[in-house]
Amino acid sequence: MKAAFTWTGEALASVADLCVRRWGIRFREGDSPRLRLLSESAYLGSADESFPGFVARLSSLDDDDPEMQAFIAQLVVGETSFFRDQPQFNALRESVLPAIAADRRREGRLQLRVWSAGCASGEEPYSVAMLIAETIPDWRDWDIRILGTDINPFALRRARLARFGDWSFRGVEDESIRGYFLPVGARTRYLQHPCRELVKFDRHNLATDSLPDPERGLAGLDVILCRNVTIYFDLALTRRLADGFLEALGPGGWLFVGHAEPDPQVFGRFEPVEFKEALVYRAPGNTVKHPAPSRDVRSAGSGRQSPTPSVPRRHSAKDQSPMSRAVEDHAEIRLPTLAEARVAYDAHDHAGASALLVAIANGGGSDPTAAHLLAQLSADEKHYDEALYWAFRALLLDRFHSPTMMLMGLIWLERGYLPRAREQLQHAIFNNPRAPEAHFYLSMVHRALENPDQSERSRERALRLARAHGGNLLESDLLPVERPRIGLAKEALAKSPPLE
């Protein structure tokens, strides 16, 4: 069992130092509670017997290690949505993209390069692709590449699927996205428009990976979007990153940062360009100093193109009647419920259940069930690294959540890490000693460890508990990892029926 551990400033500092060294992520003084919860959930999910040993081992892992990937994914909350920060997308639509298109036509070079750095689950680069499809009518004749990067491998996996729940469209008019998205289930949409093919995804560490990087397509860029990312970095890293962006942009290239990030100390080598409610930076060497607003760039000889639907625009209250006004505030948008997600899961609609559960998990709240079910879904699909990530998220909300500990034990068993599996299941039993399925799973681990006597004792204990506590239950009453309780109860009653 794990040694008792008392949190100290030194313990937190060791994790904070790891985050700065490896990924540039800086935790401020007020972030100590979150850092402690993050570290504690990862420690509880490990087989390490002491916290210093856990930090030492974690520091030695490569970023591609599943446990390290799960830890990395916890560091930054990927809060995003389609067309987030409408004034910046207005600048792109009405000025920046038309100016770039006009320049390229004059040069006879129909090429466009865009980088979305810190793209999370992909809503930002897909939004840019939709803008390009609207703004450049002959875009299919161009060489266009949009690269979305992030350090979170699980967010990138979701981005490649191009399936999004309602939460990703908050504030966007439903009618205007109909031509781009195909409904999948009641509350999930799939990006079916051909502009999806413009977007590719890759992992990239802004703190350590070099810029420019021509081999990865990070050179000669026309537009970089790095919004609400450098808020996690210190000033020295942000300055170095700004210099890297400048080198990666082509002459006159554009840099979009978050509203809280503009700083003349950092971006002094760029030219600031003001648009309506948006400040954008431009690299030196531009041929058009102040691009005039334009909603369309149509030139002779562009060829006939199939019609492209109008790109979604976020609503403004003054533009709409009260009945048709789109919802802007998060609080006004109804999040899906766990009941809806569980119905989708039990109907084997894993894509629909995943979209609903991600919205719930990212929508706040203290219930670990959504994160736990996402871990279950990932494990069902044998994405064990992502399953660990969501399991850690569940433990962040409830460090004593026995079903999550059972699930982690099964993941380690499936991957062949038997001592870790035993440790996790022992933790689950410690937190809920009356859960028959936990003892049943532990018997499986003992059998794999070639401990037949212990395996038999654990199984007998599971049957006794199931007989006492597993009757009169339906599958819908239990989480998937708890459902063997029903079968155990039936087996126990068959072996020893109750007295009449």
Image: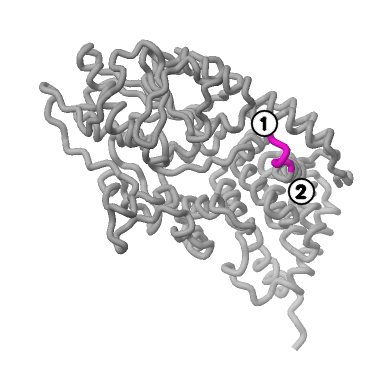
**Would you call the spot at circle 1 few (<14 residues within 10 Å), some (14-19), or many (20 or more)?**
some
> Residue 26 got which mark?
1
Depth order, front residue of 149/94: 94
Which residue is found at the position 22% from the left and 34% from the top?
Answer: 295
Pick the quarter of the image with the C terminus. bottom right
255 displayed left or right of 62: left
Vertical placement of residue 484 versus 162, above or below: below
x and y percentages locating residue 270 in the rendered image: 45, 17
Dot 1: element? loop
- Residue 284 in percent (x, y) is at 39, 12
- Look at the image and tell me whether residue 126 can be seen: no
106 to the left or right of 331: left
Depth-wise, is mark 1 or mark 2 nearer the camera?
Answer: 1
- The residue located at (48%, 39%) in the rendering is 121
Q: Amino acid at mark 2?
A: Gln
Question: Please, what is the three-letter code of the amino acid marked with disc 1?
Answer: Arg
Q: Magenta span has 18?
A: no
Tell me which segment is drawn in magenta. Answer: 26-32
The residue carrying pointer 2 sits among few (fewer than 14), some (14 to 19) or many (20 or more) residues within 10 Å by Cα, namely many
**Residue carrying label 2:** 424
